[in-house]
Image: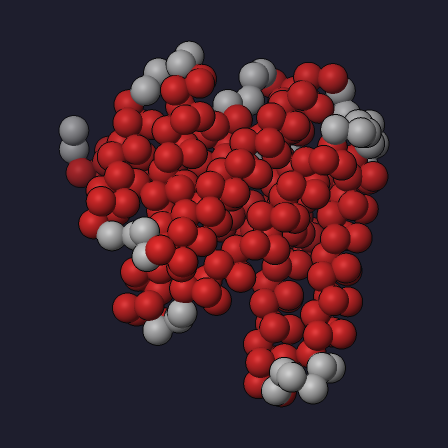
């Protein structure tokens, strides 16, 4: 293959990554989901919740028992490699590998955060707990209704509740101003993450109209799709 052909393929791949097919109307749609799209979204939420729970639990074990090490690093790499090589039809095997990878990465991440950023593992665990509970909150809400607006309002309610509790805690005499300021930053990042989950959900619901949703791949690639979704969303908002 010529270099020019390889360059053209790379450019097309990058262009396809940043260009989505859904429109601003699809993004702002808050109506009732179809049964197929609803079932697909619930599976993604459930898988994402357990993956986040495994990740957080691994971080917790690393905090109290120092469970992370060379073994968990190798385990995370091996699990991701096996997940990539496993056939999509082996759903249970791929889900199990995803959970093992999430747990191993969670148990290993403290090694890197402490070495590169000098962040204590207790803080890492406390940062992971709110988004894990937030995903669980969304999943529980999705089991009761097919209305997008109701699910997303639940997401907003949880974010506001976290802001309120953080505000009350920051006014405590036991917390200094520096810690309170850092807690506020964490809440802002968490709120942005929950907002991204809403947009990501809209993309899943849009794609569900064209076929089956591989919920394992969607869970695994949630952060990989972040730049492309943000760029496409910004493009739609600027065109409005």
Whether residue 122 can be seen here: yes
Q: Is residue 173 above or below residue 22?
A: below
State the residue in front, 25 or 240.
25
Q: Position of residue 109 (x, y in %)?
A: 35, 55
Q: Residue at x 70, y 40 (%)?
A: 138
Residue shown at the point (63%, 43%) measured from the top left? 135
Q: Position of residue 223 (x, y in %)?
A: 48, 46
Residue located 41% across and 47% down the image: 58
Q: Quadrant of the N terminus?
A: top left
Look at the image and tell me whether residue 207 can be seen. no
Q: Residue at x 60, y 18 (%)?
A: 210
> Between residues 126 and 178, which one lies in front from this camera angle?
126
Pinpoint residue 152: horizontal percent, then vertical percent.
76, 43
Q: Locate residue 170 relative to residue 88 in the image: left or right.
A: right
When asked about the image quadrant of residue 88, the answer is: top left
Quarter of the figure with residue 37: top right
Q: Up-down: is 67 above or below 75?
A: below
């Amino acid at each position: 293959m010529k270099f020019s052909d390889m360059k053209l393929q790379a450019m097309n791949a990058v262009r396809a990554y940043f260009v989505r097919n859904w429109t601003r109307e699809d993004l702002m749609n808050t109506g009732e989901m179809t049964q197929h799209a609803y079932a697909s979204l619930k599976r993604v939420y459930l898988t994402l919740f357990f993956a986040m729970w495994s990740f957080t639990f691994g971080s917790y074990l690393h905090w109290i028992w120092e469970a992370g090490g060379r073994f968990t690093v190798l385990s995370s790499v091996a699990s991701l490699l096996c997940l990539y090589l496993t056939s999509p039809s082996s759903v249970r095997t791929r889900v199990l590998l995803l959970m093992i990878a999430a747990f191993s990465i969670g148990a290993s991440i403290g090694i890197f955060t402490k070495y590169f950023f000098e962040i204590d593992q207790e803080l890492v665990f406390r940062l992971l707990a709110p988004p894990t509970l937030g995903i669980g909150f969304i999943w529980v809400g999705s089991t009761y209704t097919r209305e997008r607006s109701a699910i997303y309002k639940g997401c907003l309610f949880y974010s506001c509740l976290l802001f309120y509790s953080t505000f009350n805690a920051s006014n405590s005499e036991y917390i200094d101003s520096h810690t309170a300021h850092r807690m506020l930053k964490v809440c802002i990042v968490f709120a942005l993450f929950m907002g991204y989950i809403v947009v990501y959900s809209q993309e899943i619901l849009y794609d569900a109209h064209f076929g089956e949703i591989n919920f394992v791949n969607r869970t695994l690639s949630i952060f990989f799709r972040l730049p492309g979704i943000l760029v496409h969303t910004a493009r739609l908002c600027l065109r409005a």
